[in-house]
Image (cartoon, rainbow, N blue to C red):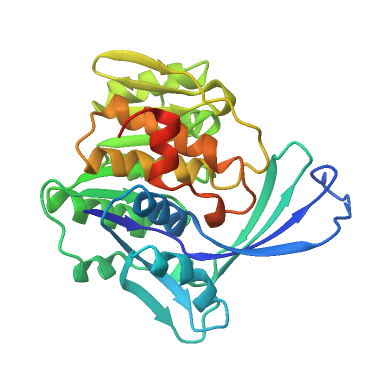
Amino acid sequence: MIVVFGSIGIDFVTRVPTIPAPGETVIGPAFEVFPGGKGANQALAAARCGADVQLAGAVGDDTSQEPALALLKSAGVGLGAVASLAGARTQTAFISIDQQGQNAIAVALGASLLARAQALGSVSMEPGDIFLAQRELPDRETARALSLARAAGATTILNAAPGTGFPGDLMDNVDILIVNEHEARDVSSALNLETTNPVEAGIAIAKARRINVVVTLGHEGAALCGSEGVLSFPPFTVDVVDTTAAGDSFCGAFAAALAAGHNIGDAVRRGNAAGALACTKPGAQPSIPMKTEVDRLAGGD
């Protein structure tokens, strides 16, 4: 089983000629609304890759609650640990996407600020389970959730996104860290490690904490840093439409592969494939690929 502790929300998405600079207004033709939130995205990605998934988090008791949970329900994600909070608004993100498919995102956390690790008390984690967290919920609650998961014997994965600074004590109960190039520098800096590039940062973190560190490098693929040194994984070439949820698709597929018994290298390869496939469709959750698609691109199951 995979247990995800993370955010759940709605995304308002508009396509623009260029990402606006500070003080600049850019005109887009329309907007679309999609379910999102990093926790929900990663839970859905794992479920679509065939995993048994439970999600813990919080939504508001507003009109956004139902659409935010709709695709999770249809994928069979367990929602018993998702709190519906009276008077709160469901997390909302505002996303601009340029002509190259790159994005800029502003997030109003709303109910996600009120999510609590104690919600995991309704989920029975056991040794062999996978626990996956990100950083759109309060760091103190994520740290508590990681501690609870470690105590239950689960393998703990932290995706250090979004990269807005990094408290070093968040690493105390992490078995596997997933970072992009910016987050790798944030984490290494928080741990007082001297590094010059993302992969070197991953190596330094892996050695300092004796964990595995996955560094995602966008169109350059990914690197796995651990006790066996560094393994590089080339990217899968696709036509990019929208990069939203590419990182979340990677994390969910990676966790699902570990839960299915794949070794960590195979998990990185399958995460790479899922992230690439997510870039070929618009939106967050609608772009997250199915297991058959990941199998086809990654090769085998």
Residue beneath the point at 42% across and 71% down? 58
Q: Residue furthest top?
A: 229
Give the quarter of the figure containing the C terminus. top left
User: Is residue 26 visible from the viewing direction of this image?
Assistant: yes
Residue closer to the observer: 180 or 239? 239
Q: Position of residue 107 (x, y in %)?
A: 61, 59
Give the vertical position of 88 relative to 159 (above or below).
below
Residue beneath the point at 34% across and 45% down? 170
Q: Position of residue 201 (x, y in %)?
A: 44, 21
Q: Position of residue 198 (x, y in %)?
A: 49, 22
Count the labels in the image: 0
Q: Residue furthest bottom?
A: 86
Q: Quadrant of residue 220?
A: top right
Give the vertical position of 8 relative to 27 (above or below).
below
Give the vertical position of 148 relative to 297 (above or below).
below
Residue beneath the point at 60% across and 30% down? 238
Residue beneath the point at 46% across and 55% down? 41
Q: Position of residue 249 (x, y in %)?
A: 46, 44
Give the vertical position of 54 relative to 191 (above or below).
below
Q: Quadrant of residue 168?
A: top left
User: Is residue 159 visible from the viewing direction of this image?
Assistant: no
